[in-house]
Image (spheres, coloured by chain):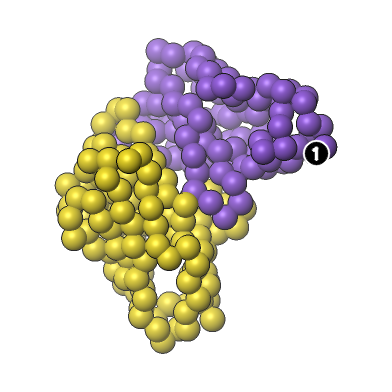
Chain colours: A purple, B yellow
Amino acid sequence: KNQVEQSPQSLIILEGKNCTLQCNYTVSPFSNLRWYKQDTGRGPVSLTIMTFSENTKSNGRYTATLDADTKQSSLHITASQLSDSASYICVVSNTGFQKLVFGTGTRLLVSP
Amino acid sequence: DTEVTQTPKHLVMGMTNKKSLKCEQHMGHRAMYWYKQKAKKPPELMFVYSYEKLSINESVPSRFSPECPNSSLLNLHLHALQPEDSALYLCASSQYSGSDYNEQFFGPGTRLTVL
């Protein structure tokens, strides 16, 4: 069964600190993995997208890694800001398939 | 223009009302999607349109009726909804459907409340 699991479910960190979010997937055949940021009541916004051959990709203070052998990905946030408070969703796509498999997300709260 | 727009932002309707949600993109994308998202849950796919034709219907009840008048517009017609249909409805688009690098761009959503 195609599944995407994320951990932790929720996380509270102090402003300025770093954090790492985890994503494990069992989607096969694998096409690509994306990380989205979703503010409450808003649509998801893409942070990174990685294919099988890519093992790291950065977007500003966000760095995603991908280990296609162990089917794991992480999203590292550096020097967190209050505006980073949101849900972070890991999404995996099958090869040539229209549907995305969504993780349940990690809710991050950055406190002052 | 690199965004997906949705109207209205908020909608409150009774169970006997008929209303429509609208979605628009001007990125030249040929695939458009409707998702339903309940609080603290991931988005659930409802419909996929590819080249203005319905290609996926995820067994959605007939009280939800999608329409794709042209390649830039996607509507979701609502009729006789139930309170449990209250949710955030997200529209998304991608360049093509079914390609390996199929990045979807999401709109801001319509918050629907059914009384």
Percent of width and height locating residue B95: 26, 37
Percent of width and height locating residue A59: 53, 22
Q: Nearer the viewer, residue A29 or A60?
A: A60
Q: Nearer the viewer, residue A77 or A52?
A: A77
Chain letter of disc 1?
A
Q: Is residue A11 left or right of residue A23?
A: right
In this view, the residue farthest toward the front is B1
Q: Nearer the viewer, residue A7 or B23?
A: B23
Percent of width and height locating residue A54: 44, 14
To which quarter of the image does residue B61 belong? bottom left
Above or below, A57 against B5 in this view is above
Q: Residues within 10 Å of mark 1 (few under 14, many from 20)?
A: some
Percent of width and height locating residue B32: 29, 49
What residue is shown at x 32% (from left), y 45% (from top)? B93
What residue is shown at x 34% (from left), y 71% (from top)? B20
Q: Is residue B21 left or right of residue A75?
A: left
Quarter containing the C terminus of chain A: top right
Is residue B56 visible in this depiction of the protein?
no
Above or below, A29 against B44 in this view is above
Quarter containing the N terminus of chain A: top left
Q: Amino acid at mark 1?
A: Ser
Above or below, B60 against B115 in this view is above
To which quarter of the image does residue A2 belong? top left
Label 1 SS: strand
To which quarter of the image does residue A41 belong? bottom right
Is residue B95 visible in this depiction of the protein?
yes
What residue is shown at x 71% (from left), y 32% (from top)? A81
**Residue wearing tag 1:** A111
What residue is shown at x 61% (from left), y 22% (from top)? A61
